[in-house]
Amino acid sequence: MTCEQDAKTLELPWPFTGREDELELIRGSLTAGRPGIVVTGPAGRGKTRLMTEAVRGSDCARITGTPETRSLPFAAFAHLLPESVTLHRAVQLLSGVRLMLVDDAHLLDDSSAALVHQLAVHGRTRLVVVVADGHPVPGAVSRLWTGELLPRLALEPLPREETAQLLALGAGGPLEPLTVNRLYALCQGDLRLLRDLFGAVREGGLLTRATDSDEWTWRGPVPVTATVRERTAQVLAHTGPEERESLERLAFAEPLAAPLGDFDLDLLERLETEALIRVDDQGAVRLAHPLHGPALRAAAGRLRARRLARTPDQCTSALAAERATLTDRIDRTDVRPLPTPVGEWLVAEGAPVPAGYAAVRARFARLRGELREAAAWAREGLRQTAGNRACGVELALAAAQSGDVPATDEALAHRPPSADAGSWLAAARGDVEAAREIVDGRWSEGEESRGLPAEDGRPAAYVLYDAVRLGAPERVAGRLAELPGDGPAVLARHAEALVDGDGPALDKVAGELEQRGFLLFAAEAHAQAVRAHRDPRAARMSRTRAVALARRCQGARTPALSGLVLGELTARQRQIVTLAAAGLSNRQIADRLTLSVRTVGNHLYSAYARLGASDRGALPWLVELPAA
């Protein structure tokens, strides 16, 4: 019985995903003449896995610190050194080791830490050292970077886009963006927790396939697994009646915050000191970690939970306030990230999302370049109100700007296409000239003289700005400049720089757009600057910036981004991708280039990851094909 349980719990790790820049940096630090590198970060961030990938295929000695052997001299090196040895002799014996991976270096005994430091001083051994944050570190180890013996890489959380790729591999298909957001927020960069929590969701049958998008979705309570209990042990350990009462009140108040005045201030100070709560500038109190609420609610008795639990109808006014704030930010041309706990809680609970709120959330996400997320919010609203026009427009625009023609056609099937949706649909089909003709027709002299309506609640500035994004800025530059406010002025400067073919001005306005949260607009402006620059170095820099931003825009394929990222690929990848975009099969490409079919497939897989594409259907959008 024990063997069966062990076999069941022993799972293979997920495929290594993302971290291309970090991987390149680490491998570069291990080339001839380089001393190595130290990688630091919180537990669960993937440091060891990253290092293992970086040294894969190399002749590497491996050292690991453990808490049980911290009092034993040279315990971490026991498999490489004689039973009794001095530090000087140990350095001599290991001087022939060319590459050494030291994992959990914060747990090394003092002698092993000193030996690692001396190996770094002597410089014959390239060292890859992994240190977890939040733990006491031997002085000899910390001096590796404070003494500038080795460079240090502080590992940031895996980006959301790469987390989505990792989850898709674990699920065997893409996850709905709102589900990805929920898992990403709950785990806060802890990949071990992510794997445990997602495994519990999957094995508990909580994943369902969405009929309208064929993506996996998760709704309902958070499974309180052993790992979740371990991560929330600090909050669950409070058994004192007053502290426990306060923590539970905050847990059952979610998604709303509780007023500061409702609690004993001395008690709150103690909880804040223990990092269990946070108080914002408005005096609202929340639990510090998103997992604390689910853990406390699961530990409460059934009757107490039934009495304290919040219902969706109790959040109506808070949801309306959230919608008003989002609308105001859109009107002010400012879509920087904004906390929206009420809408996210409704989705997590599987409760109906009002169509009006969903349309605004979809618009906010789309303007940020989060196109898949925008489509997901629009679908939430359409599930509640099937014929809602605003949600239909947002779904069509998100699909069209992703280059998804079938989804755009489906979104428009139940309503007449507006001029705006029609222009983006033409662009999605690859007919950019037709899109420009639609735009030109919309801004004819007769229509301009009647004033500018905002279709389906879309502010006038964005309706005009579509002309800039589709390549017809000369029609609307003057009108954008006439609109009041700093936000429309940024959009007007983009139009004017594009009309003038001014590369530096396009880069400057791209920076302004990025500061305001318009990642897709900024990527498009940088991409347009590539074509406008006369200095090749400036063009390369604009391309790099555009690529970096476009990767964060969830598969965006707009006319401005067409042909943008091909320069990111290796020469062989560019060759294969261009042929694939022209319609050749893997076998045909292999025959033409005298390669194996498997090699062609591997090059395409690597290229998809760099291009942000999911399959070859996206390639014509990303690759400038040679003229026939």
Image (spheres, rainbow, N blue to C red):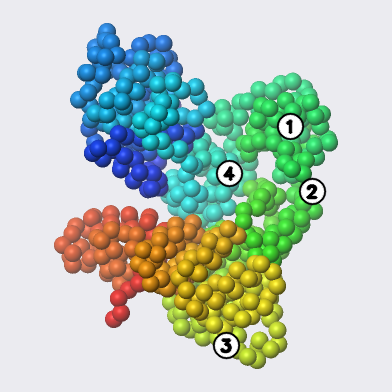
Q: Determine whether label 2 and label 3 are within 8 Å by CB.
A: no
Q: CA distance from mark 4 to mark 3?
A: 45 Å
**Three-letter residue code for mark 3:** Gly
Give the quarter of the image for residue 254. top right
Dot 2: few (<14), some (14–19), or many (≥20) neighbours within 10 Å? few
**Callout in the foreground (2, 3):** 3
Q: Which of label 4 and label 3 is nearer to you?
A: 3
Q: Amino acid at mark 2?
A: Gln
Marks 4 and 1, the one that precedes in the sequence: 4
Q: Amino acid at mark 1?
A: Glu
Q: Secondary structure at mark 4?
A: helix
Q: Which residue is mark 1?
A: 248
SS state under label 1:
helix
Question: Disc number at residue 441?
Answer: 3
Confirm whether residue 260 shows in the render.
Answer: yes
Q: Residue at x 60, y 85 (%)?
A: 443
Q: Earlier in the sequence, mark 2 or mark 1?
A: 1
Which of disc 2 and disc 4 is earlier in sequence?
Answer: 4
